[in-house]
Image (spheres, rainbow, N blue to C red):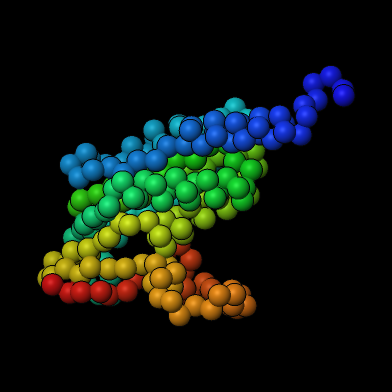
């Protein structure tokens, strides 16, 4: 055996330990109501790594209008403990799909006024493609599977909303095998991570 080589079992154990160490460095935050704005700079600094050539980020903010109505704020509620567990699973899957250095994800609870951030994702990698694709994967999966609920508050009422990604995932109408990819124009219309909103209940 060449110097420095490890038996297969020891090599696998070392690789698993390295992955676990990276996962422990990932940052997951569910920011409770009253804690203020998301600390964007801290999340970006967390994923900085000397071996990373790229940092990709996604910042989801409250816009001031929807369907011709003025939006005052969004209000978020969550099953926080479960949300953290699901987010940890999403980050593990992102690591299995892409060559990443560090990851950070944070979601704010309570009221989020127009113009402020409710969710932030950051990913660093040696190459930009991995960072960018992982960032998109994390936000798409967050919207589809994390138990966080949103109410949109207007100046003339309020509505609970569900993300299209969540409904597509949990409707039960999808076939077991994935359908053929839609044409580019159709995919763009759906909007990916920022797909159309669905009205659930109006107060």
Q: Nearer the viewer, residue 91 or 74?
A: 91
Instruction: Residue at 27% x, 53% y: name it.
Output: 78
In this rendering, the answer to whether 30 lies above or below 47 is below
Instruction: Residue at 21% x, 57% y: name it.
Output: 75
Q: Give the percent coordinates (x, y) of residue 67.
A: 28, 75
Instruction: Residue at 41% x, 71% y: name it.
Output: 170
Residue 126 in view here: yes
In this rendering, the answer to whether 50 lies above or below 190 is above
Q: Give the percent coordinates (x, y) of residue 130.
A: 62, 47
Query: Quadrant of the rendered structure where residue 145 is?
Result: bottom left
Residue reaching furthest top?
3
Q: Nearer the viewer, residue 202 or 20?
A: 20
Q: How many marks?
A: 0
Residue reaching furthest right?
1
Q: Give the percent coordinates (x, y) of residue 34.
A: 17, 42
Q: Nearer the viewer, residue 68 or 11?
A: 11
Q: Give the percent coordinates (x, y) of residue 73.
A: 21, 58
Residue 184 in view here: no
Instruction: Residue at 60% x, 47% y: name it.
Output: 96
Query: Quadrant of the rendered structure where residue 144 is?
Result: bottom left
* 52 with respect to 46 (left or right): right
* 25 with respect to 133 (left or right): left
Placement of the N terminus among the 4 image quadrants: top right
* 110 with respect to 189 (left or right): left
Q: Nearer the viewer, residue 141 or 75?
A: 141
Placement of the C terminus among the 4 image quadrants: bottom left
């Amino acid at each position: 055996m060449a110097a420095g080589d490890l038996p297969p079992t020891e090599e696998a154990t070392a690789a698993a330990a390295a992955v676990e160490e990276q996962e422990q460095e990932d940052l997951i935050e569910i920011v409770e109501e009253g804690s203020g704005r998301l600390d964007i700079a801290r999340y970006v600094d967390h994923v900085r790594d000397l071996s990373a050539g790229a940092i990709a980020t996604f910042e989801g903010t409250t816009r001031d209008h929807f369907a011709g109505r003025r939006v005052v704020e969004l209000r978020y509620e969550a099953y926080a403990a479960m949300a953290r567990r699901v987010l940890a699973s999403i980050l593990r899957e992102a690591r299995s799909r892409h060559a990443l250095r560090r990851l950070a994800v944070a979601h704010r609870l309570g009221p989020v006024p127009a113009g402020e951030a409710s969710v932030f994702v950051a990913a660093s990698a040696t190459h930009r493609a991995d960072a960018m694709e992982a960032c998109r994967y994390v936000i798409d999966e967050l919207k589809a599977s994390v138990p966080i609920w949103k109410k949109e508050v207007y100046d003339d009422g309020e509505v609970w909303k569900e993300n299209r990604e969540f409904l597509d995932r949990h409707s039960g109408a999808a076939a077991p095998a994935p359908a053929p990819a839609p044409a580019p124009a159709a995919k763009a219309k759906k909007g990916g991570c920022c797909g159309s909103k669905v009205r659930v209940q109006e107060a």
